[in-house]
Image (tube, helix red, strand yellow):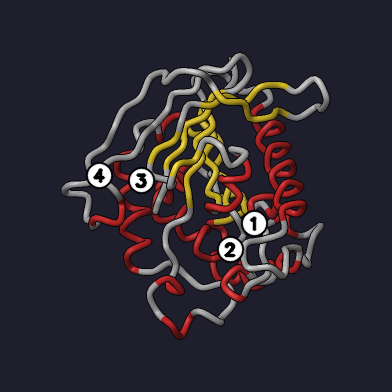
Amino acid sequence: MSPVINIIRVGKGRHHFDPKWKDRKDPPLSAYGINQARFVGNMFPHKGKIRRVFSSPMTRAIQTALEAFDPLNALDMPITVEPAFQVPSNRPSDVGSAWEDLVETFGLAVDASALFDDPDWFMNGSDTQGGDSTIAKQQAQKALRVIWEAAQGMSEHDHIVVIAHGSLINELFQGKLAIGYDEVLPCRLIDSPLSDVPMLSPENDLLETSSIDNQGGGLDGDWGSEIWLPRCLGRSRRCLLLSLT
């Protein structure tokens, strides 16, 4: 079997709370978002089994990854910054920073080599606020390819973590499985006969699920009363989804 893919939504950025950041590019995490990321890091049960951590190149996404999984850097496992997980939108808060700036900011904590071949990655989105559907679908296919390639050679006991944005996660789940980002129906990643990369496909019934009460987690009611962690037991891939709302 293949590794478990853990898809975690980026924590809330400063632009969600501070009007001054609405029209600035690449806003950082808010204090609320930092708490969200730390909460996920504290409750994540398989840190010792993580083999790769991918992040969108947006500053708030990298910060989410570092706040949740920074101790992994002690194992020489930097966060892999991957343009395939960027936001498919060119609104100010979704326009990122050049790779040189990211390396200067985060140093050896990140591996930004994937940005070298695409120096204009931060201008690859849509001019529409919600993102163009065609671009979003192309972005989702790029993301699936990255996940698929990373999973090769790993065992069922290994874990891959992906820090991505809500719009891309919604596209990955084809707009069908994400329900307000608070609960997610089971899904699986299966090999598509039309492509060499996996496609997402829904399951009919809930498989293994567990819920997490947010009490004591340092988060307020916006988190929701619980998060669903569907244990997706697909033929080819398995996927867990955590959502920071």
* Mark 4 neighbour density, 10 Å: few (under 14) some (14–19) many (20 or more): few
Chain-order first, disc 3 or disc 4: 3
Which dot, 3 or 1, sits closer to the camera? 1
Q: Which residue in the structure is indicated by mark 4?
A: 225
Q: Residue at x 49, y 22 (%)?
A: 232
Q: Which residue in the structure is indicated by mark 3?
A: 41
**Where in the figure is residue 162, as x and y percent of width and height?**
55, 43
Q: Residue at x 69, y 37 (%)?
A: 144
What's the distance in space between the residues labelled 1 and 4, CA to CA? Answer: 28 Å
Furthest residue in direction bottom, as rendered = 20
- CB of mark 2 within 8 Å of CB of mark 1? yes
Name the side, left or right, on which 126 lies relative to 188: right
Q: Which residue in the structure is indicated by mark 1?
A: 86
Quarter that holds the N terminus: top right
Name the side, left or right, on which 26 lies relative to 90: left
- CB of mark 4 within 8 Å of CB of mark 2? no
Question: Vertically, is 145 above or below 4?
Answer: below
- CB of mark 3 within 8 Å of CB of mark 1? no
Q: Which residue in the structure is indicated by mark 2?
A: 58
Chain-order first, disc 3 or disc 1: 3
What's the distance in space between the residues labelled 2 and 3, CA to CA? Answer: 19 Å
Question: Vertically, is 42 above or below 3?
Answer: below
SS under mark 4: loop
Which dot, 1 or 4, sits closer to the camera? 4
Tag 1: amino acid: Gln
